[in-house]
Image (cartoon, coloured by chain):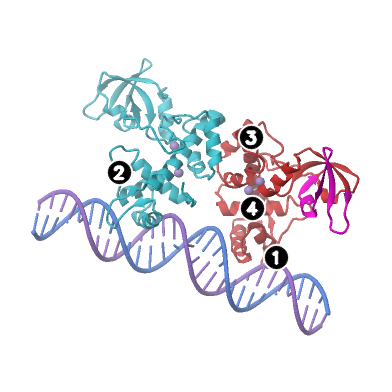
Chain colours: A red, B cyan, C purple, D blue
DNA sequence: TAATAAAGTTAGATAAGCCTAACTTAATTA
DNA sequence: TAATTAAGTTAGGCTTATCTAACTTTATTA
């Protein structure tokens, strides 16, 4: 339990670090540039913030070294992620938002400070395990179920798999997914792959589609 | 429809102005000091912001003159008030918050920018007309039903009235109100008034209580 | 290993919101 | 109406979060 209130910006830095480390299995450290590009700010800006986050004991960091979260930082970051995903679930389940409309609003809602609010929301939603994009929701203790998941691009030709989550959360990508009739759980068969330009020929509910590498890398399947 | 996004702080200035003008019938202008004290900042700070709000055509203001809202400013301020009161209603109706727990969280939620979110919330709540404190909720057009309401302190001895709203939204006041068994709608009879120290002797549901002027001035009755 | 490239840091600015202290204008009141 | 008080403004500073440009350190590669 950290007693101090984190700023909107500090919370976003911690959440980014969660995305770049905890959620990216087998990598526990990141560099300044990678963090900067994830946050859409310049490396110089990140550098200033690193000093502040280190001062507050939220990250481990030495000059010219790599960045990692401390246990306090990890918990705080997980709480932001938990809020983001619970709010997204709320918007879809209770307010009839579609999965391509929730991310932007959740970016704002994830910064509301109220323990009671988030726990009530969790209860109202009946303690959901996954958000509308198939991503696992951390529990109140900051624990998350990390699934070993592959992208569709890594699947062999001739193999069938099921969509379990999407990587890109942008509305343009999600609307593209909608257009193919895909939802979380859908079965996808890779009929063949083009070696030359890396296109994939898919069969979804007896319909055939051709998609790009970029598209296939944003679908997680199992 | 204003196309620009207002900052958190700008929204709070506009909401304050709504409270100090529109909601205070028969007064359409305020001074720098009054606004400063309502916002808990110093007059010098307000002075800086006035220039910015005037620049954005949200207020009418001349050096050494009084401050009033333009139509654009009034609409923007009303939207913040609408959001505040809808969120408070949501917290009580859907998340089992008590009326003394909602204000602080609503202070944060009122600044979430999403037209769809607030309209869905309104629908989910079945277009409520009043918030948990008995205050009217502006509609989507920024229109509000202003009730001519008296405080309990203005009521004559011997007269019965009904609680329709509370003025103070702090949890300490609301918990005090709870202690007397009062809720919106309760009947209150003023048995007598003390001239010397301005205490009021009340009868609520056959129980007798003595309350201060300060307390009575924070209850609106009809 | 020396040169080059990539990654990371520092210095100096800017904008938003806030402050205190000093000043000016307007309002009140003797 | 002149003196006093209240209200409002200005100047100069601070903090947070951002930037650009220049520099330093580390990593890569010829
Ligand atoms: Mn999201
Ligand atoms: Mn987010
Ligand atoms: Mn309130
Ligand atoms: Mn507020």
Q: CA distance from mark 3 to mark 1?
A: 38 Å
Let me know if marks 4 and 2 both belong to one chain: no
Which chain contains the residue that carries disc 3?
A: A
Name above or below for residue A113 compared with residue B63.
above
Q: Are marks 2 and 3 on the same chain?
A: no
Marks 2 and 4: in contact by CB < 8 Å? no
Secondary structure category for the residue under label 4: helix
* Both labels 4 and 3 in a single chain: yes
Which residue has dot 2 on it?
B28
Q: Residues within 10 Å of mark 4 (few under 14, many from 20)?
A: many
The quadrant of the image that shows the N terminus of chain A is top right
Report in which chain the residue with disc 1 lies.
Answer: A
The image quarter containing residue A129 is top right
**Mark 3, residue position:** A122
State which tag comes first along the sequence, 3 or 1. Answer: 1
Q: Is mark 2 within 8 Å of ligand 4?
A: no
Q: Which residues are magenta?
A: A192-220
Left or right: residue D5 versus residue A48 is: left
In the image, residue B125 above or below residue A171: above
**Of labels 2 and 3, the one closer to you:** 2
Disc 1 marks which residue?
A65
Residue drawn where x is 41% and y is 32% of the image: B136
Residue pushed farthest right? A158
Q: Residue at x 31, y 33 (%)?
A: B214
* Vertical position of residue A90 compared to residue C21: above or below: above
Q: Is residue B3 left or right of residue B14?
A: right
Q: Secondary structure at mark 1?
A: loop
Residue underneath mark 4: A14
> Picture coordinates of residue C11 (x, y %)?
55, 74
Residue A52 figure quarter: bottom right
In percent of the image, x 28 and y 25: which residue is there?
Answer: B200
């Amino acid at each position: 339990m950290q007693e101090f209130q984190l700023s909107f910006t500090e919370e976003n830095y911690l959440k980014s670090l969660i995305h770049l480390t905890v959620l990216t299995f087998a990598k526990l450290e990141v560099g300044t540039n990678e963090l900067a590009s994830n946050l859409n700010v310049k490396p110089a800006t990140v550098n200033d913030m690193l000093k502040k986050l280190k001062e507050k004991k939220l990250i481990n960091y030495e000059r010219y070294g790599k960045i990692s979260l401390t246990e306090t930082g990890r918990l705080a970051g997980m709480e932001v992620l938990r809020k983001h995903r619970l709010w997204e679930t709320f918007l879809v389940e209770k307010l009839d938002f579609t999965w391509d409309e929730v991310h932007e609003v959740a970016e704002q809602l994830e910064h509301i400070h109220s323990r009671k609010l988030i726990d009530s929301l969790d209860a109202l939603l009946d303690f959901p395990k996954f958000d509308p994009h198939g991503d696992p929701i951390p529990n109140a203790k900051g624990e998350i179920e990390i699934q070993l998941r592959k992208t569709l691009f890594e699947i062999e030709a001739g193999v069938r798999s099921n969509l379990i989550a999407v990587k890109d959360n942008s509305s343009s990508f999600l609307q593209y997914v909608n257009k193919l009739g895909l939802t979380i759980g859908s079965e996808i068969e890779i009929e063949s792959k083009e070696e030359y330009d890396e296109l994939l020929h898919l069969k979804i509910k007896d319909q055939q589609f051709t998609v790009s590498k970029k598209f296939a890398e944003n679908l997680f399947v199992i």
